[in-house]
Image (spheres, rainbow, N blue to C red):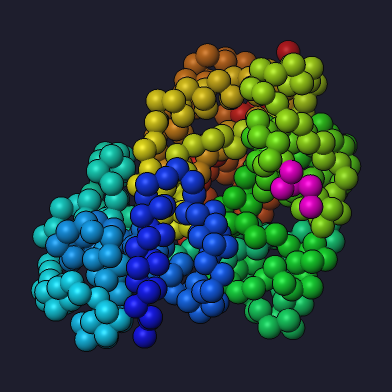
Amino acid sequence: MAKPILLHSAAELLQRILSEKIPADRQMEGYFRTHRNMGVRDRGFVAETVYGCLREKPCLEHIAGNSLLLDVVAAYLLTHGYSARALEETGFRGDARGMVERARTVDKSSLPFEIQANLPDWLASRLRTQLGDAESLTLSLALNQPAPVDLRVNTLKAKREEVQMRLAQEGFPCEITPYSPSGLRRQDRAPLFSTRCFKEGLFEVQDEGSQLLALMLEPKRNEMVVDFCAGAGGKTLPIGALMANTGTVYAFDVLAKRLDRLKPRLRRAGLNNVRMVTISHERDARVQRLKGKIDRVLVDAPCSGTGTLRRNPDIKWRNINLAELTDTQQRILAAAAELLKPGGRLVYATCSLLKEENDDIVKQFLSAHPEFHMIPVNEILARRHIPLSMTEDALRLLPHLHHTDGFYAVAFERVAV
């Protein structure tokens, strides 16, 4: 049974996450740093409870009968194994027995869609328009489940089967992922960063869907490639490995701090074909110098992140300026396109579920850039021996269908003249 103070700790941390723009995982790191008296088990309880409340907030508020965060935490515990008596023994003074009765008698199918789906109104309405009620509800239920832990094997250093065997020997057995040829999966969290395999640079943690984006680019040895929005290098690393550590990968980002996190990852991976470049904006002079010289460009665009709600449920409760995001996406895509040689490839990708950030951006880009045409994604998937078949020219991954995060990606080719 949880200590009384832990309920208040969970509510306090939940309040911070909901009231500030800082991502939940970073908020938790900071909170636990300032509460060093909390043991590993206590931190685990608080983290799991807070993430659960972020995933199920509308439904928990309905059961609690209000939106007070301590009551929301209590409702979460009551719907995840606690009895009313156990909750009262932690010192909770709210209406535990009333909550239990509401949880027991509620007919979820009679609740408003937003509560059933545990989604904010703005996101629920967009998904219903795109997919219809039935599929939107199935998708939302998948988004509200914790994600597995996916690993990408560093093929520069080892084969997938070797890493799978070594992790099993270290006490962390993994399954092979169905789509990514270098992916492994664990269903539960484990201290993988303390393994010898990790320290030797044999794998990185990366969702299977994200792993497919580098494969969409199909980079070759000795080419010049740009990862336009590199961040901490989640896609840069597999691109460099696919190029067998030859050629040059330019990792662009507007935040030097993000690129700084790539440095130790490059050392661990044994990659030396990556050049990190901090740019001030998409038309920075350091970008312009490469105009017409690049073989392939990946634009993993800044987006709403709605495809990653399994891992980042706090995104649901942030204010997202969709108009500002789509304007940024259009500008970055247009600037990235200018870098390509004739015959070069451009991959545009997001971890968004929204048509505005995906299909609409692609339609506008093709309308303004007749020198580009789409490459059917099934051709790429077949070449890479990925057992997936799409019903359209884009890669569209959805948690309830593919058991990955939600991703969208399109490959363009610049017509040779």
Q: Quadrant of the N terminus?
A: bottom left
- Let me know if residue 113 appears in the view: yes
**Where are the magenta residues, as a range?**
260-264
Comparing 185 with 344, the one in front is 185
Magenta highlight: main SS: helix
Q: Residue at x 40, y 25 (%)?
A: 323
Residue drawn at point x = 27 percent, y = 79 percent: 91
Whether residue 410 is visible, yes or no, is no
Where residue 287 sits in the image (x, y, percent)? Answer: 73, 21
Q: Give the side of residue 351 with respect to residue 54, left or right.
A: right
Residue 4 occupies quadrant: bottom left
Total labels: the figure holds 0
Q: Which quadrant is home to the C terminus?
A: top right
Q: Is 396 in front, or is 145?
A: 145
Percent of width and height locating residue 228: 67, 32
What residue is at 41 percent from the left and 63 percent from the top? 51
Quarter where residue 45 is shown = bottom left
Q: Position of residue 369 (x, y in %)?
A: 57, 15
Depth check, front residue: 335 or 311: 311
